[in-house]
Amino acid sequence: MLLACIRHRGKGEDCDALFSGLRRALGDAIAGSGLRVFCRASAGEGLDVVCGFPVARPVQAGLVEMHLLAGGTVLAATHRGPDRGLAESWEVLYDYIEAENVDVAGARREVYLERDMSGREDHITELQVPFRLPPDAAACDAP
């Protein structure tokens, strides 16, 4: 997927302004929901993330960089509600990953499927963690 993005190091709440600026800069080139790819996070240092949108064509604007987001298999969960509850949803997903011994194979990401701007914060966010299938994984035989 072709991704137009800006790297951000700092507070998570600052990403909203980045997404607004990206929407204006990218205009009709946007081809999907906004997403955040987590490069690194550590206590006291804030986030190190890439904020961006899939685009239909390359765009040159200010600090915007173009990257290819590799495809693959992801373990996903849907979070419904305010962003302040995302940490709890991530904890549930990572508890599952640990319990099932999932082989994580890339940076986690959040895809912002629906953003409620009415003030109720009825957001819908998909949490994704890329992983590797075991070599002996059988193909799905479902009808």
Image (cartoon, rainbow, N blue to C red):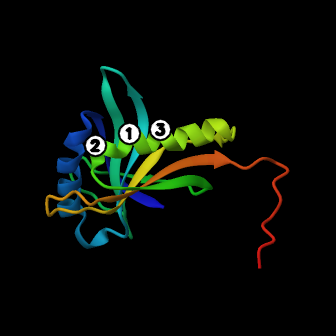
- What is the quadrant of residue 81 in the picture? bottom left
Q: Amino acid at mark 2?
A: Arg
Residue 133, percent from left and from top: 73, 50
Name the residue beneath numbered marker 3.
91
Q: Residue furthest bottom?
A: 143
- Front residue of this view, candidates 71 and 44: 44
Residue 128 higher or lower than 118, as above or below: above
> Are the two marked residues, 2 and 1, in contact with CB atoms closer than 8 angstroms?
yes
As drawn, is 138 to the left or to the right of 77? right
- Numbered disc 3: secondary structure: helix
Whole-Å distance between the Cαs marked 1 and 3? 6 Å
Residue placed at 20% from the left, 60% from the top? 25
Residue 32 higher or lower than 37, as above or below: below
Name the residue beneath numbered marker 1.
87
Residue 43, percent from left and from top: 35, 21
Q: Residue furthest left?
A: 119
Q: Estimate how packed mark 2 is, as few (under 14), some (14 to 19) or many (20 or more) residues with alpha carbons within 10 Å.
A: few
Whole-Å distance between the Cαs marked 2 and 3? 13 Å
Name the residue beneath numbered marker 2.
84
- Numbered disc 1: secondary structure: helix
Residue 47, percent from left and from top: 33, 32
> Are the two marked residues, 1 and 3, in contact with CB atoms closer than 8 angstroms?
yes
- Numbered disc 2: secondary structure: helix
- What is the quadrant of residue 85 in the picture? top left
